Image: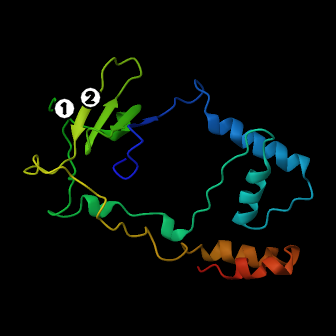
Amino acid sequence: MTIKQSIKIIEHKFLLRGHTHMEVDSIQSQIEREMKRLPSFAIMTPWDWQQLARMCGTKNKFEVVEMEIPDFKNFNNLMDNSNSPYCLNKKTKSKQNFLISKVVHMQFRLDSPGTLYFKTSFSDENFEEIDFNRKGRSRIKPTITGMELKPVRENRRPISTQKYNHLQKLLKWVPSRFHHFILSHTF
């Protein structure tokens, strides 16, 4: 949010099973319908899924953002040492224990960096707060714009030997132009 100032609030709601509808459900069903409509469209690599998603919809096409391994960032250095702008806090501002597993609604606000607003019930009228700003820095507004966030990992995650062996058996049904993708997996 500090990088993209036009975003004032980010909200995240954890939906209850069987009681809600998620937009992603309709997106998934559109992708499945497109797959049935195009039975000759073979999915061999993750890139093929991206192309299928791009073809979905007539009026509102999906915006597919391709992400590679370096695009997934590790945010641990925002909290991992005394020079980090944030710290792990286990107490709310009202001195209650904070349990992320009880949270059903979270809110992050541009005007309150480092503070998490949350509800443990959808019927709660007001948000509770937990402050992750490092103590002693109340006069210094925390910023991550100058911090370099490292990737979560440098290479693809290895697969199990069992999965690798199974992929080798499936190669006879995979067109040869995709063999490199399958053979490039490490285990």
Question: Could you say which quadrant of the image residue 65 lies in?
Answer: bottom right
Point out which mark residue 128 bears.
Answer: 2
Locate the C terminus and report the quarter of the image it occupies: bottom right
Q: Is residue 22 toward the left or the right of residue 39 in the image?
A: left
Question: Percent from the top left, x then y, of residue 46?
Answer: 70, 64
Q: Residue at x 32, y 40 (%)?
A: 110
Name the residue type under label 2.
Glu
Q: Residues within 10 Å of mark 2 (few under 14, many from 20)?
A: some
Q: What distance separates the C-alpha of mark 2 from that of mark 1?
A: 10 Å
Dot in front, 2 or 1: 2
| Disc 2, SS | strand
Point out which mark residue 173 bears.
Answer: none
Q: Is residue 164 toward the left or the right of residue 31 in the image?
A: left
| Disc 1, SS | loop
Point out which mark residue 96 bears.
Answer: 1
Q: Residue at x 71, y 58 (%)?
A: 50
Foreground pick, 68 / 145: 145
Q: Residue at x 45, y 72 (%)?
A: 153
Callout 2–callout 1 Cβ contact below 8 Å: yes
Name the residue type under label 1.
Gln
With respect to residue 164, does 142 lie above or below? above
Q: Residues within 10 Å of mark 1 (few under 14, many from 20)?
A: few
Foreground pick, 160 / 131: 131
Question: Percent from the top left, x then y, of residue 122?
Answer: 42, 22
Question: Percent from the top left, x then y, of residue 114?
Answer: 25, 45
Foreground pick, 82 / 157: 82
Question: Percent from the top left, x then y, of residue 40?
Answer: 92, 58
